[in-house]
Image: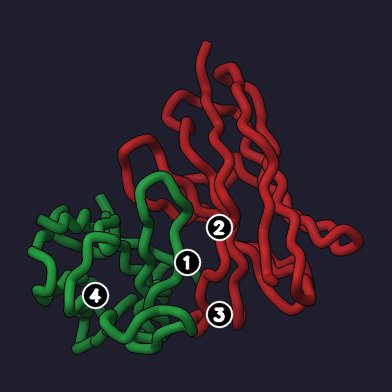
Chain colours: A red, B green
Amino acid sequence: QVQLVQSGAEVKKPGASVKVSCKASGYTFTSYGISWVRQAPGQGLEWMGWISAYNGNTNYAQKLQGRVTMTTDTSTSTAYMELRSLRSDDTAVYYCASWAPLGPGGWFDPWGQGTLVTVSS
Amino acid sequence: QSVLTQPPSASGTPGQRVTISCSGSSSNIGSNYVYWYQQLPGTAPKLLIYRNNQRPSGVPDRFSGSKSGTSASLAISGLRSEDEADYYCAAWDDSLSGSWVFGGGTKLTVL
C-alpha cells in the first residue's frame, strides 16, 4: 500500500540544523509531489512547502524562505526537508505528505507518521 | 493567524448532525478547491474530503463537503464518538505564488 515513513525524533540546540527524511513506497515516486507540514505543540497545521519529485521544482512558505531546503533522492524514493538556524518556535511535529496531482487540484494523501523536532538549549 | 478561518470548537451528541465552517477569500477558496483533513488524537492528519465534496474510498458517507463563494462547510451526520477529532480545511492560494493555506482547525467534541 502507499506509505510514507519518516525518520525518528530529533533534539537540536538553537542555531543548529535538522534534516528529516520521508521514504515513500507503494507508488511511482516521481509521479507525485511531496509537501511538508508542521504542527507546533497544541497548535494547528502550517504548510511549509512542496517539492516535485518529477523535476525537483520547489516552492517554500514565505516565512521560511532562506532557512528551509527540500530535496528528493529518486534512487531511494526518499524526500528530505532541512531546516537551518533553528529557534525554539521551530519545535513541532513535522509531517510529509504525498501530493497528487501536482497543482491546485491535488491533495495530500497519505501522510507520514510525523517527526518530532525539539529545539532546546 | 491562519489565512482560512474556522471556529475553534464544535460539539454534538451521538446521532446529531454538525457542520464546521471555513471562510477564506477570492484568492483561495473563491477560486480553488477546498480540502478537509481529520486528525484523530495523537495521529497524523488524514484526507477526509477532496475537491470540495469528494470522499476518498473508505470515508463514510456521513461526511460531506460543500463550497459556496469564498466559504466552505464540512457536515457530519449521524455523529459517532469516534468522530471526535480536529478538522482542518485547506486550499491553494493564488496570491502566494502557488502556496497552500490551512484553517486554524476545529476541535469536535462528541458529548
State the separation of the CA atoms marked 1 and 2: 7 Å
Determine whether label 4 and label 3 are within 8 Å by CB.
no
Amino acid type for the residue under numbered disc 4: Ser
SS type, badge 2: strand
**Residue A30's spot in the image, x, y percent?**
78, 74
The nearer-to-camera label among 4 and 3 is 3
Question: Looking at the rendered structure, which numbered label has been put on residue A118?
Answer: none
Labels 1, 4: one chain: yes
| 10 Å crowding of disc 3: few (<14), some (14-19), many (20+) | some
Distance between the Cα atoms at labels 2 and 4?
A: 21 Å
Distance from Cα at disc 3 to Cα at disc 2: 13 Å
Q: How many marks?
A: 4
Mark number displayed over residue B25 = 4
- Disc 2 crowd rating (10 Å Cα; few below 14, some 14-19, many 20+) is many
**Horizontally, is B58 left or right of A50 in the view?**
left
Mark 1 = which residue?
B99
Q: Is residue A22 left or right of residue B104?
A: right
Please provide percent x and percent y for residue B97.
Answer: 49, 69
User: Considering only order in the chain, which callout, 2 or 3, is on the residue closer to the N terminus?
Assistant: 2
Of the pair B108 and B99, the residue shown nearer to us:
B108
Mark 2 residue type: Gly
The residue at which mark 2 appears reads as A49
Let me know if marks 3 and 2 both belong to one chain. yes
Residue at (36%, 63%) from the top-left corner? Answer: B38
The answer to whether any part of residue B3 appears in the image is no
Tell me which chain the residue with mark 4 is part of.
Answer: B
Please name whichever residue, A54 or B41, is drawn nearer the observer in this view of the structure: B41
**Which residue appears at 66% of the width and 70% of the height?**
A33
